[in-house]
Amino acid sequence: MPAGYHHITLRVTDLDRARAFYAGVLGFTVDQDFPGEKLRLRFGAGPARLVLHPLLPGTPAGDRFTEARVGLDHIAVAATRDEVTRLTDELGAAGVRADLHRDPLGSVLVSFRDPDNIQWEFFEDS
């Protein structure tokens, strides 16, 4: 049985815009920056890492994430209720649409999308 996730890698259309969102809005800390040929960013996100890579050659122009394709639907991250509330406020202040929900068991979560339309949830870990 796995001990946890080591990292998640996402393809993004604009690394600078993604850095501004993940570091500036979500507060993730860049722990590795690989400019040049292996252009990518790595963020510390608790015990796991989030790695961002540019699009691969041949990606259709204007391509955006959609959960309607086979593969990833969304990313859910464990958080405290206070973190969910704080993040909801910070997303709103940054102009990011954030939907605060309560699941059937009473946990709170905030769902939102990054600049490439990837859906995230910060979910109260009860």
Image (cartoon, rainbow, N blue to C red):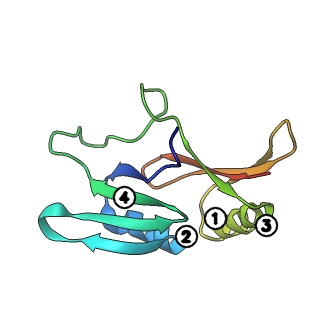
Give the mark nearer the N terminus: 1 vs 2: 2
Residue 112's tag is: none
Residue 82's tag is: 3
Under mark 2, the amino acid is Val
Image spot of residue 5 (x, y percent)? 48, 49
Name above or below for residue 106 compared with residue 89: above
Label 2: few (<14), some (14–19) or many (≥20) C-alpha neighbours in 10 Å: some
Which residue was labeled with disc 1?
91
In whole angstroms, how far apart are the C-alphas of marks 4 and 1?
21 Å
In whole angstroms, how far apart are the C-alphas of marks 4 and 3?
26 Å
Q: Are marks 1 and 3 in contact (CB under 8 Å)?
A: no
In whole angstroms, how far apart are the C-alphas of marks 1 and 3?
14 Å
Give the mark nearer the N terminus: 3 vs 2: 2
Seen in the image, is 35 located left or right of residue 84?
Answer: left
Image spot of residue 104 (x, y percent)? 85, 35
* Disc 3, SS: helix
Q: Are marks 3 and 2 in contact (CB under 8 Å)?
A: no
Give the mark nearer the N terminus: 1 vs 3: 3
Which residue was labeled with disc 4?
51
In whole angstroms, how far apart are the C-alphas of marks 2 and 4?
17 Å
Under mark 1, the amino acid is Leu
Q: Is residue 96 visible?
A: yes
Which residue was labeled with disc 2?
25
Label 3: few (<14), some (14–19) or many (≥20) C-alpha neighbours in 10 Å: few
Q: Are marks 1 and 2 in contact (CB under 8 Å)?
A: yes
Give the mark nearer the N terminus: 2 vs 4: 2
Give the mark nearer the N terminus: 4 vs 3: 4
Q: Residue furthest front?
A: 1
Label 1: few (<14), some (14–19) or many (≥20) C-alpha neighbours in 10 Å: some
